Image: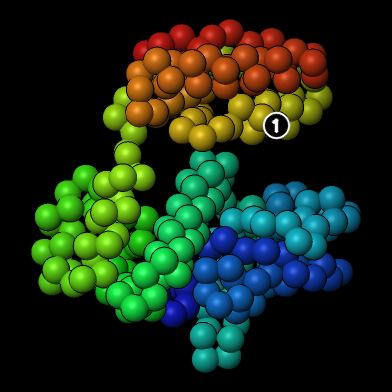
Amino acid sequence: MKKADPEIGDLVVCTVKDIRDFGAVCNLDEYGNKEGYIHISEVSSGWIKYIRDYVREGQRIVCKVLDANPARGRFDLSLRRVNDHQKREKLKEWKNEQRAEKILSNLSVQFPEKFDKNVAVEMMEEKFGSLADALDLAAVEPDQFLSELGNEGWASIIVTYAKENLKPPTAELRGVIKLRSSSGDGIEVIKKALQAGEMEGIEISYIGAPQYRIVSRAEDPKIAEDNMRKSGEIIISYLKKHGGIGEGPVKE
């Protein structure tokens, strides 16, 4: 079942609410908009002159929980202790949960007499840990999904929807791209180039300079290959515009 409060060490999705001289107040988006605080020393490594050079009001970020005191409503957060891969994975997980919850909301509107969203969310989180994982199971293993939920009538509605609309990716392609930049802010340029290449079904991770891995997942192998090629072209194009060079991606 979903936790009422984040715990020390958890990664949390936040929206920056208020910038102050010595830190930033954030809403904890996954926890009923409870608030957390990032001290300026945990915004970024090194000396910070203007905190707004690193975070701004309304920005969605991923932080690590350093200290948690739910009784006092206090959660101390760190932005600098979350790497790019952790950020991407956490945001992906959060977006999947948001999508799953929207699907359940829509089903409750379509079947108001048969589907109670609150009951469905509570039982699915208790049985499967996350709504997104539950919907994936409903699409791939409907009998197991129904059995876990005691064959509730609303569970059959979810299975019907999942089988018709939630086809999981069946093809995975891996490639390596090499990126170099000799400019003074080369690391930042490469980082932004990689961000430009992010798209649905694409996962990018660091191997070791100058190599980065691109994993492309899609329902069809040809689509996975095309998406990897497009992602690589976008990355290298961005890099070249900012004085860098790139090669690949080459399939592993």
Residue at 53%, 14% in the rendered image: 229
Q: Quadrant of the N terminus?
A: bottom left
* Nearer to us in this view, 199 or 162: 162
**Is the image coloured rainbow, by chain, by secondary structure, or in one colour?**
rainbow
**Residue placed furthest toward the bottom:** 71
Look at the picture and state if 230 lies above or below 103.
Answer: above
Which residue is painted at 43% across and 59% down in the image?
Answer: 103
Give residue 152's position: percent from left, percent from top.
18, 72
Quick one: 160 or 14, which is closer to the camera? 160
The local crowd at label 1, few if under 14, some if 14 to 19, many if 20 or more residues have their Cα within 10 Å, is some
Q: Please name the residue shown 49% across and 16% down the image.
A: 226
In this orientation, does residue 151 appear?
A: yes
Q: State which quarter of the image contains the C terminus.
A: top left
Q: Amino acid at mark 1?
A: Lys
In the rendered view, tell whether residue 152 sits above or below residue 15. Answer: below
Label 1 sits on residue: 192
When the figure is inspected, residue 80 is found, relative to residue 187, above or below; the finding is below
From this viewpoint, is residue 76 visible? no
Snapshot quadrant of residue 75: bottom right
Along the viewing direction, whichever of 167 and 108 lies nearer the viewer: 108
**Residue 198: % across, % down:** 58, 32
Q: Tag 1, which secondary structure? A: helix
User: On the rendered structure, is 122 left or right of 48?
Assistant: left
Q: Is residue 141 left or right of residue 198?
A: left
Residue 58 on image: x %, y %: 76, 61
